[in-house]
Image: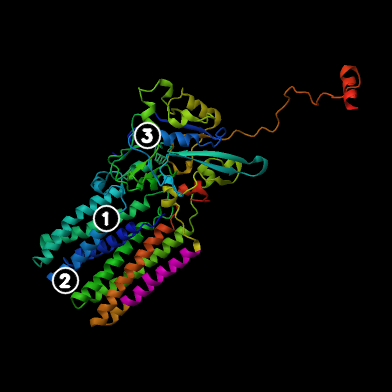
């Protein structure tokens, strides 16, 4: 059913991505591929993986941008994956009913047994979050690791998306963005979390935290202003210095 | 956007068929075209053949063509689904209309109703096809109010050109159909010029700054792409055609689809007998070729907002 849920989902699970701390290491990209190629429900296939021109379906991509110039400029590593939009145009365009948004937690999914591989949803997504699995003939996208976050066979601390679990810089946070008490909501409030392309009105669930402002004046750290004199005039060290300098 | 040959064949061929079906469904019941068997066989054969070829071509690029029937289920939200539903439903009155015309040589009473319903179905199907593109806000060259009128006008033009050709080949030809063909050529390409002017002046609403949320730091430039080889997104949505080639191709489309077609269709009006018939056929061929070129450009010139993450400056 490709109509969007009639009511705003009470839980809106999603990611908060910190553009300040992301180091662009691509660990989340690799762990996403690793989990999703082995997990539910079919592999995330590659074409010619060992040839000169490999190509394949990945659900998470990390770009690196330069923003601004000079001292005010930044190099920003930028992970890009499905934002689980509230106004998910990818869902409503789907002719087969394969794409849907869950009413219970807002996650946007593709039923791979119904998808006919027309690609229209990828055209409708402004963020490029959907990639066709050319070998499988079906559309793939981030599932927010539904097969981890609800998986009772995993220890509780592992029930988070693969990308979040693996991030060495702790730049990725997972939680319920509809719960005012959740850590992700507090983080968004504290750090001024933002929507991507807000002018288009897709209302992404995922938020991005902007790089922190640059700190020019660090103030006093308690360190001495100058280094200790290595050649004091008197005392044992002075004698030693003179003796050794001879 | 990648100009897939299956989609160009689909929209061009189905446009010919629906344009022709629309005109036949109106002209036969009203007596403008006689309900004669061989004429009916040729005209309805061409219309339904072109429609079926187009619909078949539209399944070529699917990852799972055997699931295409599922596309009839989501007409509440999806224009692609609506198009499929209306296309299938239209076969029913079109088939009845064809039987009346070819088997019983009549287009009166109930047969007339079938003809009119087939014309309506043809019209709605082309609107749905155009809306698949026009509803995609991610591609500003498609999300434009001239897209639906242009699709309708090109279906009308190619339908009228083939109608004129069929009437010349299977009968004496009629002045009104020849004049209609010429007029529709002017209308279609006139609207296309308006469309080109509208998209050329539209700079879009999004930028790499709004796509990344980094506007506060200044201009955003791509330093490192996320992958070293092309992926699905770049193949499908990164197709770009240099401005100068696009200009040249627009001129070629105009020369073939507009100028040559208009000259041939004017010759069909001014001459008679076999010269008129050959001119009408040439007009139909060049008009269809020009339409395919126009469709190719409709894709090749369209840019998707995801390319903001790959170096584009506006979308
Ligand atoms: S980011 Fe794209 S694929 Fe994900 S919900 Fe939004 S529109 Fe759909
Ligand atoms: S590719 Fe699959 S999920 Fe996407 S619109 Fe087509 S049928 Fe729906």
Other residues around mark 2 within 10 Å, as few (<14) / some (14–19) / many (≥20): some
Q: Are marks 1 and 3 on the same chain?
A: no
Identify the magenta region: B244-265
Magenta span: chief secondary structure: helix
Locate residue B196 relative to residue B105 in the image: left or right. right
Q: Distance between the Cα atoms at labels 3 and 2? A: 60 Å
Q: Distance between the Cα atoms at labels 1 and 3? A: 42 Å
| Whether the residue under disc 1 has CB within 8 Å of ligand 2 | no
The residue beneath circle 3 is: A38
The residue located at (73%, 25%) in the rendering is A220
Foreground pick, A43 / A98? A43
> In the displayed structure, would residue A69 be above or below residue B172?
above
Q: Is residue B52 magenta?
A: no
Foreground pick, A205 / B8? B8
Residue B125, numbered circle:
1
Percent x, y of residue A70: 67, 43
The residue beneath circle 2 is: B39
Given the image, what chain letter belongs to the residue carrying mark 1? B
Q: Secondary structure at mark 3?
A: helix
């Amino acid at each position: 059913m490709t109509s969007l849920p009639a009511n705003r989902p009470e839980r809106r699970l999603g990611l908060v991505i910190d553009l300040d701390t992301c180091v662009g290491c691509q660990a989340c990209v690799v762990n996403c591929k690793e989990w999703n190629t082995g997990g539910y429900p079919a592999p995330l296939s590659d074409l010619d993986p060992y040839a000169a021109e490999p190509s394949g379906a990945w659900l998470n991509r990390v770009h690196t941008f330069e923003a601004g110039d000079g001292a005010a400029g930044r190099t920003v590593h930028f992970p890009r994956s499905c934002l689980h939009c509230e106004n998910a145009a990818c869902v409503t365009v789907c002719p087969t009913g394969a794409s849907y948004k869950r009413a219970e937690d807002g996650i946007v999914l593709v039923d791979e047994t119904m998808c006919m591989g027309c690609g229209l949803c990828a055209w409708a997504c402004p963020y490029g979050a959907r990639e066709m699995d050319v070998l499988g003939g079906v559309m793939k996208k981030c599932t927010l690791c539904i097969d981890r976050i609800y998986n009772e066979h995993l220890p509780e601390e592992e029930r988070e998306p693969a990308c979040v679990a693996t991030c060495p810089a702790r730049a990725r946070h997972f939680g319920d963005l509809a719960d005012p008490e959740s850590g992700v909501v507090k983080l968004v409030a504290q750090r001024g979390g933002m929507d991507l392309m807000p002018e288009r009105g897709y209302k992404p669930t995922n938020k991005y935290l902007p790089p922190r402002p640059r700190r020019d004046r660090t103030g006093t750290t308690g360190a001495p202003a100058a280094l200790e004199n290595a050649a004091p005039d008197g005392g044992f060290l002075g004698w030693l210095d003179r003796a050794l300098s001879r | 956007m990648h100009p897939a040959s299956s989609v160009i064949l689909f929209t061009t061929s189905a446009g010919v068929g629906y344009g022709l079906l629309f005109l036949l469904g109106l002209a036969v019941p009203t007596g403008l075209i006689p309900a004669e068997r061989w004429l009916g066989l040729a005209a309805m054969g061409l219309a339904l053949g072109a429609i079926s070829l187009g619909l078949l071509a539209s399944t070529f690029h699917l990852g799972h063509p055997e699931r295409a029937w599922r596309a009839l289920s989501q007409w509440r939200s999806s224009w692609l689904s609506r198009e499929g539903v209306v296309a299938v439903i239209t076969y029913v009155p079109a088939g009845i209309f064809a039987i009346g015309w070819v088997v019983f040589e009549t287009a009166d009473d109930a047969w007339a109703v079938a003809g009119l319903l087939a014309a309506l179905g043809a019209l709605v199907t082309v609107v749905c096809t155009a809306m698949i593109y026009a509803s995609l806000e991610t591609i500003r060259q498609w999300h434009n109010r001239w897209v639906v009128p242009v699709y309708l006008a090109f279906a009308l033009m190619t339908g009228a050109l083939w109608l004129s050709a069929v009437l010349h080949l299977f009968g004496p030809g009629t002045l009104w159909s020849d004049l209609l063909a010429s007029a529709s050529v002017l209308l279609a390409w006139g609207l296309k010029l308006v469309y080109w002017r509208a998209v050329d002046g539209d700079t879009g609403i999004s930028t790499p700054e709004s796509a990344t949320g980094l506007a506060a730091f200044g201009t955003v430039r791509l330093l490192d792409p996320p992958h070293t080889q092309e992926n699905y997104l770049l193949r499908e949505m990164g197709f770009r055609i240099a401005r100068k080639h696009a200009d040249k191709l627009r001129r070629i489309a105009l020369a073939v689809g507009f100028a040559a077609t208009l000259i041939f269709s004017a010759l069909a009006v001014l001459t008679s007998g076999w010269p008129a018939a050959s001119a009408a056929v040439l007009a139909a061929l060049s008009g269809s070729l020009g339409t395919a070129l126009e469709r190719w450009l409709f894709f090749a010139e369209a840019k998707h907002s995801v390319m903001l993450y790959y170096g584009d400056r506006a979308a």
